Image: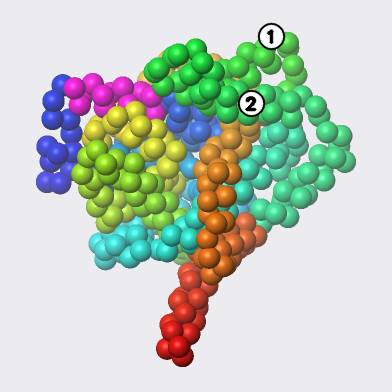
């Protein structure tokens, strides 16, 4: 059976130890992100943690990539926020079952092979749009105001900022978010100057510094909600809701497919010069579908492959899927042991970390490189990004593909005339 093939697990003691170390390293990166995306989605920190543990383990075991690390992601919160706003948190188990089933059907019909062919600049525009949306979603946390009502990102962000100014901007949440960002983006530089060679997660350090600062100076700003040691809860799906949740479930399945295969493809590119990559796209869809369905039933939310965590896994010298499984088990151990400590994290610091994550998703250097291309490719990029930000992710990809096909057709006609 594919899952239990020897090639999926360490072949010797060295690989085994490197996988264990890589899994622990990724867990330290994943914990603050899981908490943040759980909160931002409109659910809870416990939801994000449950997703990282359950989906992270199941997708690692049954998925199609040796290096993929799955869990809650910023892109998924973009879809979940309007869904939860409309249907409530109680709809998540049914939503997860339907979305998971769609992903499994996609894998059976081998649609993963087609999704891998989405043009590069559509993916780039999609990724940039997601990064902008994730950053805008953090405004309620860094301004310490309630999120404005609505489904569209830009109008909600505008209303949230306006509310903040009307109520009077609170200096401390903004200052703590800024402190978190400064620490996050300078941690690696400081460690290099100190000649510390082992990997230290910048997000973890940033949250530790920000939380310590708040406690020492007794700054009165909100913390994230309490995180129970038992983050799992059984919630049976209401099948009668399945039909009305079909469209959001399709959006979630499509997003999970694109983001997971993109993440797995990035992982294979990172190791192509050192090890032979083996990405099985349709198995990856099956693993993500199973992970999403089970996670949503047991207190989590829909999951996808996570690019940043997967990249950390590869750079930590992971060899097999054991590393991602260890990442999930490490999160479980840490939460059981010290859950109350994570409850002390300031909400503004969490917002700062997630803004930092959005900048990492599509950094300024990468944007400059993308802009140095042809006008037709820029049109594809900007069309995808603009619609992703102003409408939603699915329409963003659809419009990007439409512009790509129109441009391709126009080029062929021009060549025929010549």
Residue 26 at x, y percent in the picture: 39, 29
| Res 272 → quadrant | top left
**Res 188 seen here:** yes
Q: CA distance from mark 1 to mark 2?
A: 19 Å
Left or right of residue 397: residue 10: left
For label 1, the residue is 216
Q: Magenta residues, as a range?
A: 14-26
Q: Is residue 156 above or below residue 323?
A: below
Which mark identifies residue 391?
Answer: none
Quadrant (top left, top right, bottom left, bottom right) of the C terminus: bottom left
**Res 288 seen here:** no
Residue 271 at x, y percent in the picture: 29, 40
For label 2, the residue is 182
Question: Residue sitting at 45 percent across and 31 percent down?
Answer: 30
| Res 140 → quadrant | top right
Question: Residue sitting at 24 percent across and 38 percent down?
Answer: 274
Helix, strand or loop for disc 1: helix
Residue 250 at x, y percent in the picture: 45, 61
């Amino acid at each position: 059976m594919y899952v239990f093939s020897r090639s999926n697990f360490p072949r010797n003691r060295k690989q085994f130890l490197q996988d264990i170390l890589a899994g622990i390293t990724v867990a330290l990166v994943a914990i603050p992100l899981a908490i943040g995306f759980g909160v931002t989605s409109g659910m809870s920190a416990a939801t994000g943690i449950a997703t990282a543990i359950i989906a992270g383990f199941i997708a690692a075991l049954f998925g199609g990539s040796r290096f993929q690390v799955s869990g809650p992601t910023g892109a998924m919160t973009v879809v979940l926020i309007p869904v939860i706003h409309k249907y409530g948190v109680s709809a998540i188990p049914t939503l997860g079952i339907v979305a998971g089933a769609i992903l499994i059907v996609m894998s059976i019909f081998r649609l993963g092979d087609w999704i891998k062919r989405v043009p590069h600049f559509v993916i780039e525009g999609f990724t940039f749009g997601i990064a902008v949306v994730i950053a805008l979603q953090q405004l309620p946390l860094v301004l310490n105001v309630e999120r404005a009502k609505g489904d569209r990102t830009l109008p909600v962000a505008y209303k949230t900022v306006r509310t903040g100014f009307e109520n009077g901007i609170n200096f401390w949440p903004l200052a703590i978010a800024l402190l978190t960002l400064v620490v996050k983006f300078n941690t690696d530089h400081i460690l290099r100057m100190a000649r510390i060679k082992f990997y230290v997660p910048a997000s973890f350090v940033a949250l530790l510094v920000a939380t310590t600062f708040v406690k020492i100076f007794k700054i009165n700003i909100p913390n994230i909600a309490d995180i129970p040691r038992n983050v799992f809860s059984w919630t049976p799906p209401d099948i009668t809701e399945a039909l009305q949740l079909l469209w959001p479930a399709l959006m979630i399945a499509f997003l999970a497919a694109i983001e997971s295969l993109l993440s797995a493809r990035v992982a294979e590119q990172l190791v192509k010069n050192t090890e032979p990559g083996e990405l099985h796209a349709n198995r990856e869809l099956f693993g993500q579908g199973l992970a999403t369905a089970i996670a949503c039933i047991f207190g989590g939310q829909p999951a996808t492959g996570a690019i940043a965590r997967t990249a950390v896994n590869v750079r930590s010298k992971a060899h097999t899927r054991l590393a991602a499984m260890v990442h999930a088990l490490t999160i479980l151990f840490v939460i059981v042991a010290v859950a109350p400590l994570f409850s002390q994290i300031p909400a503004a610091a969490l917002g700062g970390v997630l803004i930092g994550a959005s900048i990492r998703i599509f950094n300024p250097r990468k944007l400059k490189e993308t802009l140095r291309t042809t006008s037709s490719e820029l049109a594809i990029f900007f069309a995808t990004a603009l619609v992703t930000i102003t409408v939603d992710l699915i329409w963003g990809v659809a419009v990007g593909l439409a512009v790509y096909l129109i441009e391709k057709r126009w080029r062929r006609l021009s060549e025929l005339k010549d």
